[in-house]
Amino acid sequence: MGFKLVNVSRETFIDQFNVNLEKIDKLLLFEKLLIETLSTHQIISRKDEKKIWNRHILDSLMMMFHVKHYNIDVIDDVGSGGGFPGLVLAVVIDELKVRLVERKIKKCNFLAQVIKKLGLKNVDIICRDSFEKKIFSDFLVTRAVFGEKASGNIYKLISDKGIFFNYQNELYPISKLKIINKLDYVLPGEEKKRYLVAYRKSLL
């Protein structure tokens, strides 16, 4: 099963997923906190300062389609960095339990501050290397892993019947994993198509 969305907008999520204005306000506060932090820490690339909403927040919200489709109640965001997509999902889906897995202390500290200021109760931070922790997730997502070789390491973290969701700029095969679903879309202000691909372990 696949989806095709072009020029995704903020209204898409307000209309289709009932993301109310209170949650939009929290996401806007999150954006503000990211911008303020850029003066002292590079939580995200400084060149993205004026593109945070589209390139990071809207992009993260695309995962809502998979969360709803697979009825996910707990998910691990590996290499969460500035909180994408996990923290964004925690803001908009109250019933979703999110674990942010991030190995860099300064980013963990930033995430903790954001969680406190946004009053989020459905988020935990795991401040260590994901492979050291050996998560064995049923549902795992990442925007921080690129390429066939790097993504293949995720195989070690997924439970036998688990699903790995990977944000990609291009489609490529991953050893020991098979594609079971994909979402392709174009973000506002961008021209290149993005992919959010769902994988399971191959039993072959």
Image (tube, rainbow, N blue to C red):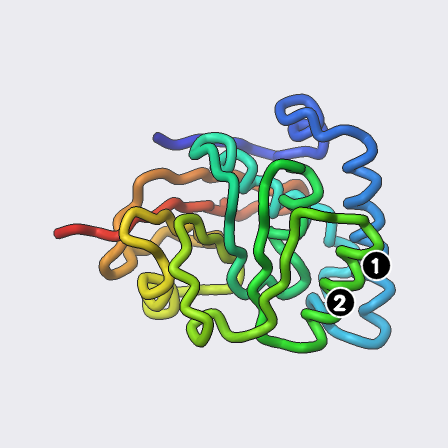
Looking at this view, is 120 or 170 the one in front? Answer: 120
Q: CA distance from mark 2 to mark 1?
A: 9 Å
Q: Would you say 135 lies left or right of 54 here?
A: left
Placement of 183 over or under 121, stated as above or below:
above
For this orientation, the residue located farthest to the top is 15
Query: As drawn, which residue projects farthest toward the left?
Result: 204
Relative to 17, residue 47 above or below: below
State the residue lying farthest toward the front: 121
> Which residue is identified by label 2?
110
Residue 107: x and y, percent? Answer: 69, 71
- The image shows residue 165 at horizontal and vertical percentages of 43, 49
Mark 2 Cα shell of 10 Å, populated few (<14), some (14-19), many (≥20): some
Q: Residue at x 46, y 45 (%)?
A: 196
* Residue pictured at 66% horizontal, 47% vertical: 122
Left or right, 188 with reference to 33: left
Q: Is residue 73 visible?
A: yes
Q: Which mark is residue 33?
A: 1
The dot on residue 70 is none
Where residue 19 sits, quadrant-wise, is top right
Label 2 sits on a secondary structure element that is helix
The amino acid on which the numbered mark 2 sits, given as a three-letter code, is Phe
**Amino acid type, residue under disc 1 in the picture:** Leu
Nearer to the camera, 163 or 144: 163
Residues at discs 2 and 1 in contact (Cβ within 8 Å): yes
Toward the viewer: 30 or 194?
30
Residue 55 appears in the figure: no
Expressed as whole percent of the image width and height from the top left, the position of residue 64 reads 56, 37
- Measuring 56% from the left and 40% from the top, which residue is drawn there? 62
Q: Using the image, determine if residue 162 lies above or below residue 24.
A: below
